[in-house]
Image (cartoon, grey):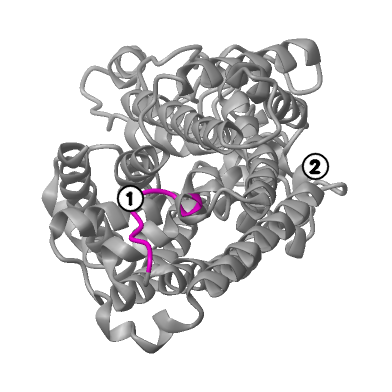
Amino acid sequence: RNPKGASIFQTALNIAKLCMGTGTLALPFASQKGGLVFNVVGLGLIGLWNYYSACCLLRCLELLPVELRDADSCDRSGNNCEGVAKCVQIDDGSERKNIDSYGALDRNDENNSDIEKTHAPNQKLKKQPIICPPPEGTTAYGTVAWYASGPKGLLVLDLLMLLLFVGLLIAYEVAMMSFITDMPITTGSNKVDLLIPSVIVSLLSCAPDISFLSNFSALGLLALALSFTVIAWQGVDDNGLYGFYHMDELNLFPKNWTDASSWFGVVAFGYGIVPVIFNIRDSMAQPEYVQPSTKIGLIMVFVGYITISNGVRILFSPAHVFDGDVLQAMPDTWISFIVRLLMTFVVAVTAPLIVVPCGELIEGKLGIDETDHFSQKVTIRVLLCVVCTILAEYAPGFVHIVSFIGCFCVAIAGFVLPPLFSIQLALKQDRGDHDFLRFKTMLPSLISPQIVGDLGLLVVGVAATVITSILTFIEK
């Protein structure tokens, strides 16, 4: 428990703000691609999918070795668990060694051969698996990957999460660049103009954990609401309510698979809370209430997304077709300037919600303690912001980045890996070993309702990720 952590409602606000960041600018584009009816139904289904996947990961904690199940045994960043300094206790009493890198998970051959030598030649012993802990500094999500899929699983997850976080930060930087470029108040240099919000992002990113950012999340949501209020007012001023009286002229469903893929990428990007659910949980004063907080936050996001996506698209439909972010529909007036200023602030308070867990991932791998080496933590997070700012200058348009990141990175980390890890850990717990080749042993566990549900969503997740990623990449 963290007495100074976020409350249930503050956590829900953090979740809503994490989702409803810059990605909201692409929601009318998603409605354009997906169609009005498909968009509403799809937003609800993707929200439920996110909630189920988040519950999958939280359930995985209950399937870890006993030493790692207690939330209080881990520090607030979700990193160094006290129970992983040695291999998990088993019955053979053999020597255990710590793992400091992506090494072997099971040490059956070496240790069991020593055990057999100490017994009578005619006594046949069953080999017992020795489950070694993950490397020090491994995040909670990484610990789940380690015990589910071994060192290779942890390595794949770390690379994927790093790619996801960096991609998100680059998308945010690209968005801020587009906002600032069209502002009437400028220094004459895009790089200098971008420096001010980037400094704000860097300063907020030095927070110990995301619970500190809950107050800024409330301000960010208020700024977001004001932004879209102004956008809606502009749409009414330009077109009146003509679009609502002629909704039959708008598409209700995607025109082709490519449009459906673009829709999926934007919406998956906008709902991507699953990869950081452990960070959210660790930031709470009462981590056991993370599921209700997640449910409240996702409901808030669902209502907001329907209003923004379909509502704004219908208002601007008589005069504008969305092929990019929503600000393209705004005229070059003082109203547009206010919206861009507000959205710059929204991005500035959203980006730290990504920088903090990304920084914790890097700090954990470098062995930087949460309480010590504060200057090193600050250096890493500031450098991360600087690198992403530089890479943003060479990135494609904002909507294209959002769509591809959603189809590939967010879909794998949020829809594919959680049910996969849940299945693997459940099967290992039922059998008490790590041999996945014995089908007869697996069969009783495979027919349980929980694993059948996980398996179904795993298949759907893999298919959706592969198909939408390919189509979105080809389109760009």
Question: Which mark is drawn over residue 281?
Answer: none
**Is 248 left or right of 308, judged from the image as shown?**
left
Examine the rendered structure and indicate whether residue 271 appears above or below residue 208. below
Q: Residues within 10 Å of mark 1 (few under 14, many from 20)?
A: many
User: At numbered mark 1, what does the secondary structure look like: helix, strand or loop?
Assistant: helix
* Residue 326 within the segment the image draws in magenta: yes
> What x and y, as percent, mark residue 371?
81, 21
Stretch of the chain drawn in magenta: 319-327
Q: CA distance from mark 2 to mark 1?
A: 30 Å
What is the secondary structure assignment of the residue under circle 2?
Answer: helix
Q: Quadrant of residue 347?
A: top right
Frontmost residue, 465 versus 138 = 465
Task: Determine the residue positioned at 37% across, 23% down.
Answer: 155
| Callout 2 amino acid | Phe
Q: Say whether residue 459 is visible.
A: no
* Magenta stretch: helix, strand or loop mostly: loop
Residue ID for mark 1: 265
Q: Position of residue 105 (x, y in %)?
A: 37, 23
Residue at point 31% right, 48% down?
416
Identity, as a three-letter code, of the amino acid under mark 1: Gly
Q: Nearer the viewer, residue 54 or 341?
A: 341
The furthest residue to the right: 4
Q: Residues within 10 Å of mark 2 (few under 14, many from 20)?
A: some
